[in-house]
Amino acid sequence: MIPFSIYLHIPFCRHRCNYCDFNTYAGQEKQIPAYLDALRHEIAILGQAAGIRLPVHTIFFGGGTPSLIAPGEIHRVLKQIEKEFDLLPNAEITMEANPGTVSRTQLEALRTAGVNRISFGMQSSHPEELQLLERIHAFEDVIDAVRWSRQAGFYNLSLDLIFGLPFQSLERWKTTLDHAISLKTEHLSLYSLTVEPGTRLNAWVQKGIVPAPDDDKAADMYEYAMVRLARECFRQYEISNWARVDNSGKDYASRHNLQYWLDQPYLGLGAGAHGYAGGVRTANVNAIGQYIRMMKKENSSVFPLSPANRVFEKINRETEMQEWMMVGLRLTEQGVSRAAFWARFSRQMEAVFGEEIENLLELGLLEWFGDQQDRLRLTHQGKLLGNQVFMQFVGD
């Protein structure tokens, strides 16, 4: 059986950043105890609904700011998962954290609780850029957080960076990247800023308070990062993600995120969480209070559905093939293979997407590679125009 992954959404924040359109809430900390009760209840319901102890090889606490939750409560959540699921040895257990919300003592307690990977939202090393994004930390907090994590026994750390900011120059981006590299973490995630509708940043752009991101400048920053990180022995395994491989051959690519990109099953628990298992896509209600109320009312469900679902959709074969191409092409090293496509769908890839593939090959955005020239991946130019490639398969 293919192992499952579990995503746990922690929607609480001290401050909601101006660019964020995730399901997060500031000033709701009083609801944390009831929320965690509901989350453990959802774990129990889904575990029992599965009918067997499903194998789980990755767990991811995302948010929001999961590091606002006490380590003892994180431990209780993990123990609930161990009770209901078959948590495999050496499972990857990741927590997102804001560098301004952690201490050495807290990190030591999280490591003891079972968390073995931390992803810090660094974003930038420049105070003006952090202020523009309304982040509540300084770069000095990132330095401290990484040092404390090492002292606490974490040997798998990741940093998130954002490029393409209003007013950001290529030189300032180079400095941020240099500072991130100097911290010697095992993994980096680099994201181009997207101004999402409904965010404060979007309102500022609409009013002319700050300029819209410059796509050409962002492309220059991305190209620079690809070259710079290759020199530092980071391998780009996904369009926005780079990982080290240590001297023993250990690969620090995010196993949890690979679950998504390999189109393998995952459960999404918590307010606003999304899941995909058994050919069914699920999404929970967003509001914290509504999530808590719905979980209090129910004690059973039909797997993979949860009492908190607001959306559940059976994915048809055509959609599944489209999404297989989209997520697979995000994997910049391995791409999509003819053999894997046939094994999954009993169809030839070109028989389904021949026109799209041929068009993208002619545009120089895709290329065949491998010993048998039977794998399809993004070219260098394709990485810069990834969304245009993906739209050929799944539309908007």
Image: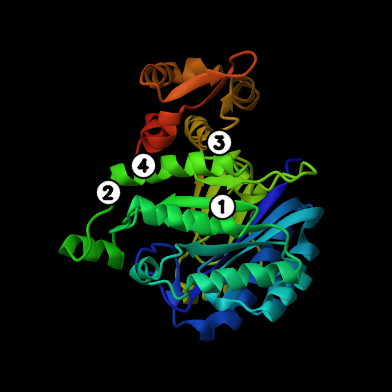
Q: Which quadrant of the rendered structure holds the N terminus? A: top right
Q: Nearer the viewer, mark 1 or mark 3?
A: 1
What residue would you read off at disc 2?
Answer: 214
Residue situated in front as seen by the camera: 75 or 313:
75
Query: Which residue is found at the position 72% from the left and 64% from the top?
Result: 154
Question: Decide: marks 4, 3 in contact (CB < 8 A)?
Answer: no
What residue would you read off at disc 3?
Answer: 331
Q: Nearer the viewer, mark 4 or mark 3?
A: 4
The answer to which quarter of the image holds residue 358 is: top left
Residue situated in front as seen by the camera: 324 or 280:
324
Q: Secondary structure at mark 3?
A: loop
Q: Secondary structure at mark 4?
A: helix
Mark 1 packing: few (<14 Cα in 10 Å), some, or many (20+)?
A: many
* Residue kind at label 2, given as amino acid type: Asp
Q: Secondary structure at mark 2?
A: loop
What residue would you read off at disc 1?
Answer: 188
Query: Which residue is found at the position 35% from the left and 46% from the top?
Result: 218
**Upstream in the sequence, badge 3 or badge 2?**
2
Q: Residue furthest bottom?
A: 30
**Upstream in the sequence, badge 4 or badge 1?**
1
Q: In the rendered view, does 280 fall on the left or right side of 215?
A: right
Tell me how far mark 4 sits from mark 3, CA to CA.
Answer: 19 Å
Mark 4 packing: few (<14 Cα in 10 Å), some, or many (20+)?
A: some
What residue would you read off at disc 4?
Answer: 219
Mark 2 packing: few (<14 Cα in 10 Å), some, or many (20+)?
A: some
**Is 392 placed above or below 115 here?**
above
**Is 244 placed above or below 269 here?**
above
**Upstream in the sequence, badge 1 or badge 3?**
1
